[in-house]
């Protein structure tokens, strides 16, 4: 069915289609609409889930962990301070190998108090063992949420997946949406290590370094295995539902001599900048990173890179630029832009490209 | 691409009006986005929404600085905010008022008494006249989308037929 929807309602609609047995959540701006809508679905009977309105985000993730370990599908959603508040449990969920799916509506961190888009919140979870995907349209928010369940629950992965969408810019925008019938695209969850009361075992026991190291390495092995699971899932999704996704969303990259790399909605706005620059004769393309964990192999060749970071690691630099530098050894022009919902237009992005100085960092809107 | 900036006060239904505009354009077979700009404001404060309509998918998420059309649901905002900022030279204005105010006459402006229509059709909730559905009728008259798509959008979103009645009354009353 083709309709219109906000980003938040698209996530909720995908969750209804994925039919989690348990949803535990706490509302926070700008995520509230997701859990509100799921609560509506549970109330009107269109989603048969146990909805647990918990008293904090820490409890939301704890409840998902408790439910997931019994072998049922679970979902929660949060944002910003909510994600940070549940951080201990976020780590636990991955360590316990639980295929929880969470939507995080990217929002800046206070103080100053700010409810608008920024990626520093979810990037503080990048070392937890969660898979992370960043989306840029209402349709992609829906599709990525559906795929997240299948990826997380695959036996080769058994790791939680975080679907990230920009606060307000995407969570509250209305665009067209085509919902699908998931059918057997998401098979029933079979969790090999679920609690089995007939064969009691220990969970979360004190572990010596000998086993601990193996357990941690096993997370990394599954993270690497998730690469093929993601590819298979996205290919199967395209085959069934006609929409293709990959590690990056590339726009006019083939003959590009300059690449603009970014995440989230800025990556779509960048495509308009690319068209503008191409008219000026500048051979440039846009590469929007969708997956941050696992971090994809990037086809950068010898091109000049302009990396837009809607985040910052103090004392270090933009996190995307730093990741690209670490993974590829390539320098870039790093623009810190869009923090706290700062407006970045395609004209601004075009000027980043025109004024690029490879090997330097610039904060958009700040006079040094 | 046709770009519309909608000015209203928090609680007047501007955000819903923006969604309805996108839905009506979408039912016309167009691509459309509606993006409310949320500031720190709350109920009663001036707020703004951005609506884009195009034949191609829309990739712009930033604000609209040079609108083709400015819609003002609450004329008292004109004294507080420069609602005409960046309006294209051939841009249009639709204002909720019995007639075009003197200060707005320098623009290609149209007036329709949405508040009066809401009161006449008893489209009142908690003492406040509802403006978000009547404005859709007026915008259909201005050619933003077809009257049929306006009707479809409103009935898809609202079961209460007072909404459609008010919209159709606005369609009839607006003189183009």
Image: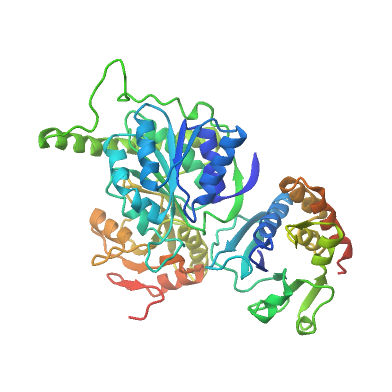
Q: Position of residue A148 (x, y in %)?
A: 43, 38
Q: Is residue B164 above or below residue A244?
A: below
Q: How many numbered discs sit on the rendered protein?
A: 0
Q: Residue placed at 31% from the left, 56% from the top?
A: A301
**Farthest-out residue, top:** A198
Pick whichever, A50 or A96, lies toward us: A50
Q: Quadrant of the N terminus of chain A?
A: top right
Q: Quadrant of residue A317?
A: bottom left
Pick whichever, B17 or A38, lies toward us: A38
Left or right: residue A153 versus residue A53 is left
Q: Is residue B126 above or below residue A368?
A: above
Q: Position of residue A261 (x, y in %)?
A: 39, 59
Q: Position of residue A26 (x, y in %)?
A: 45, 47
Q: Report the coloring of the rendering.
A: rainbow
Left or right: residue A123 versus residue A16 is left
Can you see residue B161? yes
Left or right: residue A154 versus residue B47 is left
Q: Quadrant of the C terminus of chain A?
A: bottom left
Can you see residue A139? no
Q: Residue placed at 33% from the left, 39% from the top?
A: A227
Q: Position of residue A340 (x, y in %)?
A: 43, 66
Q: Residue placed at 79% from the left, 82% from the top?
A: B105
């Amino acid at each position: 069915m083709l309709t219109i929807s906000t980003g938040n309602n698209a996530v909720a609609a995908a969750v209804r289609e994925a039919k989690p047995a348990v949803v535990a959540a706490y509302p926070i701006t700008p995520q509230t609409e997701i859990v509100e809508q799921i609560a509506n679905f549970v109330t009107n009977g269109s989603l048969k889930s146990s909805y647990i309105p918990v008293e904090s985000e820490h409890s939301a993730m704890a409840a998902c962990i408790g439910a997931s370990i019994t072998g049922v599908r679970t979902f929660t959603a949060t944002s910003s301070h909510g994600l940070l508040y549940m951080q201990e449990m976020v780590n636990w969920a991955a360590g316990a190998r639980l295929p929880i799916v969470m939507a995080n509506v990217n929002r800046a961190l206070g103080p100053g108090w700010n409810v608008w888009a920024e990626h520093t919140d979810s990037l503080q979870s990048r070392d937890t063992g969660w898979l992370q995907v960043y989306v840029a349209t209402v349709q992609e928010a829906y599709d990525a949420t559906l795929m997240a369940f299948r990826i997380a629950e695959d036996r080769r992965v058994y790791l939680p997946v975080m679907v990230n969408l920009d606060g307000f810019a995407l969570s509250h925008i209305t665009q067209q949406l085509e919902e699908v019938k998931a059918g057997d695209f998401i098979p029933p969850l079979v969790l090999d290590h679920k609690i089995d009361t007939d064969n009691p075992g220990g969970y979360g026991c004190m572990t010596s370094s000998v086993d601990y190291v193996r357990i941690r390495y096993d997370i990394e092995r599954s993270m690497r295995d998730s690469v093929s699971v993601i590819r298979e899932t996205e290919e199967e999704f395209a085959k069934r539902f006609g929409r293709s996704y990959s590690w990056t969303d590339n726009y006019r990259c083939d003959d590009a001599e300059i690449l603009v790399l970014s995440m989230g909605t800025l990556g779509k706005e960048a495509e308009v900048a690319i068209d503008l620059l191409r008219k000026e004769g500048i051979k440039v393309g846009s590469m929007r990173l969708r997956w941050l964990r696992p971090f994809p192999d990037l086809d950068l060749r010898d091109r000049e890179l302009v990396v837009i970071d809607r985040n910052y690691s103090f004392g270090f630099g933009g996190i995307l630029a730093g990741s690209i530098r670490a993974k590829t050894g390539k320098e870039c022009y790093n623009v810190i832009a869009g923090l706290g919902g700062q407006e970045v237009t395609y004209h601004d992005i075009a000027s980043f490209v025109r004024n690029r100085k490879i090997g330097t960092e610039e904060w958009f809107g700040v006079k040094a | 691409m046709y770009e519309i900036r909608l000015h209203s006060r928090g609680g007047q239904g501007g955000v819903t009006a923006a969604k309805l505009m996108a839905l009506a354009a979408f039912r016309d077979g167009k691509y459309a986005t509606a993006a409310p700009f949320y500031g720190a404001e709350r109920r009663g404060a001036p707020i703004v929404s951005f609506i884009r309509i195009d034949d191609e998918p829309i990739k712009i998420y930033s604000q609209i600085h040079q609108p083709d059309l400015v819609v003002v649901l609450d004329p008292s905002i004109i004294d507080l905010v420069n609602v005409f900022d960046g309006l294209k030279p051939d841009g249009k204005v639709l204002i909720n008022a019995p007639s075009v105010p003197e200060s707005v006459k320098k623009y290609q402006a149209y007036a329709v008494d949405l508040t009066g229509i809401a009161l006449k059709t008893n489209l009142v909730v908690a003492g406040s006249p509802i403006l978000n559905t009547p404005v859709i009728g007026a915008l259909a008259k201005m050619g933003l989308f077809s009257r049929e798509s306006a009707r479809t959008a409103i009935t898809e979103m609202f079961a209460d037929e007072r909404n459609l009645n008010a919209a159709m009354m606005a369609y009839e009353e607006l003189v183009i």
